[in-house]
């Protein structure tokens, strides 16, 4: 029997997938910040003797993070099945859903590389950056259900809004990449013997800060350009998304400076990593909102899932 999924059910399943992908970013950070990165020294087994081992706090923390990958995998598989059950058939939703499967499989492999290379900073950076790609795809999948088929991901306005938006997204992406370089240079490597980049920490922090300020400057220009748009649905949608992004960015910048001037305590680093995820989501949401002026909210509650 053919699978049919209501828009409401689809949105719930994709929200669960998005939430799980965000949670595992924070749980992965907890592994590193507690020095548990090599709590399981082998992969896919925890060690040479056991597949699962929770005999110490470090192994338990690393093991819980690994096992949570199963939750992520299930949520992603359900999202794929749901995408195939949407009627009429939506190729965009199916492709986005399958991108999550590819990304999760890639993360499992990268996670193995992280362990087998002794927490090399490049592998850790890749692990986090692929997570950012995954949460962006999951957000797009969640929001695309609300727009008609063939709606563009990015709706041009033929104004400076487009240019500033593209520039800000690029600056935001560079800021996040530089943030991982800071992390790979500073403390909290995940294990006391883990390799670190040999950069001068002050230099990489300052470079990261320059791009934070550049991103904020572009946000100001983008905000002013949005305010110049004619009053209507597009401006309203962009206004709301822009306000959220500004609040998240200022909070994240504040936490970043706070952690730097207080000796980079683990708790603030965890908060900063969660904030980086929120910042990237808010940035992607702003891009997706640029097409929402043609959205027709079509979520219903009358349909059910049938197998």
Image (cartoon, grey):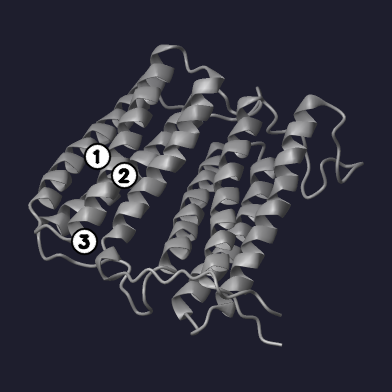
Quadrant of image for the N terminus: bottom right
Give the residue number, with chain letter if any, for mark 3: 233
Q: Is residue 171 above or below residue 191?
A: below
For the residues bearing labels 2 and 3, Cβ distance under 8 angstroms: no
Tag 1–tag 3 contact (CB < 8 Å):
no
- Other-residue count near label 2 (Cα within 10 Å), few / some / many at <14 / 14–19 / ≥20: many
Of the two numbered discs 1 and 3 on the same chain, state the one appearing first in sequence.
1
The span from disc 1 to disc 2 (Cα, nearest Å) is: 6 Å
Q: CA distance from mark 1 to mark 3?
A: 25 Å
The foreground one among 209 and 151 is 151
Determine which of the numbered discs, if any, sits on residue 215 in the image. Answer: 1
What residue would you read off at disc 2? 172
Q: What residue sits 52% from the left and 50% below the top?
A: 131
- Residue 184 visible to the viewer: yes
Q: Secondary structure at mark 3?
A: helix
Q: Residue furthest front?
A: 302
Q: Height in image: 227 above or below 307?
A: above
**Within the image, what quadrant is residue 34 found in?**
top right
Taking the spot 75% from the left edge, 39% from the top edge, the residue there is 64
How far from the left and from the top, in percent, is residue 85?
A: 59, 79
Residue 234 as seen in the image, left or right of residue 17: left
Residue farthest top in this picture: 262
- Camera-near label (1 vs 3) is 3
In this view of the protein, can residue 99 be seen by the observer?
Answer: no
Q: Position of residue 266 (x, y in %)?
A: 55, 21
């Amino acid at each position: 029997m053919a699978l049919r999924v209501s828009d409401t059910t689809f949105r719930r399943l994709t929200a669960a997938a998005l939430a799980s992908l965000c949670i595992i970013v924070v749980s992965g950070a907890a592994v590193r910040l507690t020095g548990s990165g090599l709590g399981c020294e082998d992969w896919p087994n925890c060690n040479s003797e056991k597949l699962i081992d929770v005999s110490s706090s470090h192994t338990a923390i690393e093991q819980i993070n690994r096992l949570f990958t199963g939750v992520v995998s299930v949520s992603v598989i359900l999202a794929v099945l749901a995408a195939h059950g949407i009627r009429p058939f939506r190729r965009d939703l199916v492709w986005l859903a399958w991108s999550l499967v590819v990304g999760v499989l890639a993360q499992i492999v990268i996670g193995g590389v992280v362990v087998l290379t002794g927490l090399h900073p490049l592998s850790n950076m890749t692990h986090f950056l692929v997570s950012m790609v995954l949460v962006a795809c999951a957000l797009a999948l969640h929001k695309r259900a609300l727009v008609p088929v063939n709606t563009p991901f990015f709706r041009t306005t033929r104004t400076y809004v487009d240019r500033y938006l593209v520039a800000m997204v690029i600056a935001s992406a560079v800021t996040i990449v530089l943030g991982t370089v800071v992390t790979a240079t500073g403390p909290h490597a995940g294990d006391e013997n883990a390799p670190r980049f040999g950069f001068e920490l002050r230099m990489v922090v300052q470079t990261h800060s320059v791009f934070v300020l550049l991103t904020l400057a572009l946000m100001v220009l983008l905000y002013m350009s949005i305010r110049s748009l004619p009053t209507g649905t597009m401006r309203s949608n962009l206004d709301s998304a822009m306000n959220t992004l500004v609040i998240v960015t200022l909070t994240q910048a504040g936490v970043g400076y706070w952690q730097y001037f207080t000796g980079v305590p683990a708790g603030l680093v965890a908060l900063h990593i969660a904030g980086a995820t929120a910042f990237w989501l808010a940035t992607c949401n702003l891009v997706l909102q640029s097409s929402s002026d043609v959205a027709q909210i079509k979520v219903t509650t009358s349909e059910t899932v049938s197998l």
